[in-house]
Image (cartoon, rainbow, N blue to C red):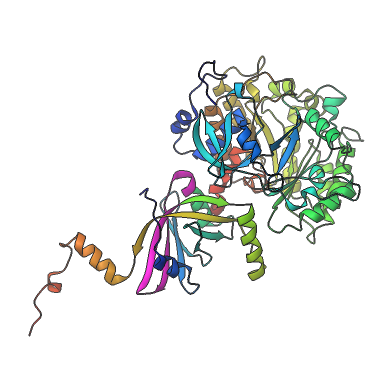
Amino acid sequence: MSHEISLDASVIALFNDPATIKVLGTVDSNGVPHVVVKQSAHIAADGNIHYLELIESSRSNANMVRSIWFDGTVSFTAIADEAHSVQIKGKPIKAHITGPLFLQHYERLHDTHPDADLAAVWVIKPQKVIDQNPATRRAVEAAKHPHFVHLDKLAKRAG
Amino acid sequence: MSAVGRVRYRSEPSFEEVAARYPNFPRLIALKIDVHRRGVYYTQRALSNVDPEKHQIYGWNGISFPHSLLLRDGTTLLVMPQTPDKDPFVVDFFDGAFWLLNDGAVVEEVEIWPKPRYYDNLTRSGLRMGDVVSARPQRLDLFVTSFCYFYHVDEQGCKFCSLPKLHKTLRSEHKLPTRLNVDDVRECFTEALKEAGRFTNIHITGGTMVKGSDVGDLEVDYYIEILKAIGDTFEAKKFPSQLLATSYNERQLAKLKENTGLSSFTADIEVLNEEKFNWICPGKARWVGYKEWKDRLVRGVDVFGRGNISTGIVGGVEMASPHGFTSEDDGLKATLEEAEWLAERGVTTVHVVWMPAAGSQFHDLKAPSLDYFIRLSQGLQDIRLKYGLTVDFDDYRRCGNHADSDLARLYYADR
């Protein structure tokens, strides 16, 4: 998975809606998943996902470091409601730990959450977008794997 | 920069070849090591795009150089400019960014350290604050004295060290006193801390002063004075900080701890082998001694606690000719065995990459291979993991000069 993609306006709108729940998925060196809500995540002007990592010693941060060092993939799932959610898989490409972007977020964070600290602003380059709407997912997979269905779903309806 | 038509300074496998041998070692950290080992050459195009308003720079021999660089994972590079004949990496500027090149091939985008806001302010005594207290990407640096008794009086300075000469020149260029004034220091810290989010650690160091009833008593008193001035700028009694000084006895360490907000202590042993230490660091050997240096580190754990006492080594200097180890395997084995002895007793060891520096007695020697440094970095971090030691006060962010403690980023969450 090495493609570079541009996100559709509808995906960006869903992701950047403050009401949308955004969930980061990473794995550790043993393949153990770590899935946590990161409401700071947003699609920035550069087309990448940016999120604020508030805890230097968090599992997410360690897994992000491992991913940027060893070309690992992470995911963000953005959920508006059951019918409207997308999953974006991508590669961490940068960790801002100082500099203008970091300080800008640090100051904004201080205004809204004075007790919070900031470890890094992570930048994730999207590589694949999956529409997680159940009906859409069913249709996509049915087209690819027509054998994977219970027969009663295909049977003539009585009457 | 083309190497065609001349003999290379080093005859060795390429960076890519060596990095490929270690798939479980982060390529970006291997790159950091190699950049530290070989230095960088800034093209004119790069230098002309350095912005003194945005970037942290320093003047040396009439040229303004970027203080240093950052990689995209937040890894700090602390690298000295090098001449093209020594096969350095090249920093160029194109497509609106600075790039690191190796043999003409682009390796990574790099950033120049951002300049802190306080840098150009003046103290009441008229000194530029950036000359009194310098900065790394997330650290405030205080080099309190350019005087080192071992070097200036005994003529027994550490043979790899160029700092006394370098700092004497820098201090004379910037008209700084030999010893910093505590009021200047306090003013600088007050100003620096106004930039929210800019700093996570304070590092204080200087040359050795042996005077006192016990060796170093005056040095301890001076550091206490400095640390109290820094402490005046904090609400909290303790603050994230590291004093890198001469080896102190328990009484001196306890005095430091009781009277200041200092949170960690480091005394660099430089070389983890007694025979090489005696040769390379004659001043330290004469005034403290190898065994006593190690024992003081161990006893320091009782004062500052596990994970807050460390020693630094100049990685690879144990192979300096003519009296060093003649094989990298032997040098590495001796170093890691001693580091493990210290770790068992609560002392952590970090290394810098030895780059024979102009102004040092070892200036015309060559540093060991990248392969050696990768094994050394991994070895030191593995020892920390084995003995449950942390290195939080001296890691990628709080320091940035140790490839081995950069690796600790992967393990913070395991504790």
Which residue is depicted at the point 70% across and 46% down?
Answer: B308
Is residue B390 rendered to the left or right of residue A135?
A: right
Residue B134 is inside the magenta segment:
no
Magenta segment, prevailing SS (helix, strand or loop): strand
Q: Nearer the viewer, residue B80 or B220?
A: B80
Counting every numbered tag in the picture gives 0
Q: Is residue B78 visible?
A: no
Q: Is residue A57 above or below residue B60?
A: below
Q: Position of residue B18 (x, y in %)?
A: 47, 29
Q: Is residue B173 left or right of residue A108?
A: right
- Residue B179, by quadrant, is top right
Please check the rendered image and state whether residue A80 is part of the magenta-colored stretch, yes or no.
yes
Q: Position of residue B111 (x, y in %)?
A: 60, 44
Judge from the rendering whether residue B414 lies leftward or rightward of residue B303; answer left or right. Answer: left
Q: Residue A136 occupies which quadrant of the picture?
A: bottom left
Give the residue at the far bottom of this rendering: A159
- Residue B295 in percent (x, y) is at 74, 35
Report x, y in % for residue B199: 70, 52
Position above or below: B284 against A82 = above
Q: In this orientation, does residue A33 appear? A: yes
Q: What's the residue at 41%, 70% (across, down)?
A: A79
Give the magenta-colored segment's residue range.
A67-91
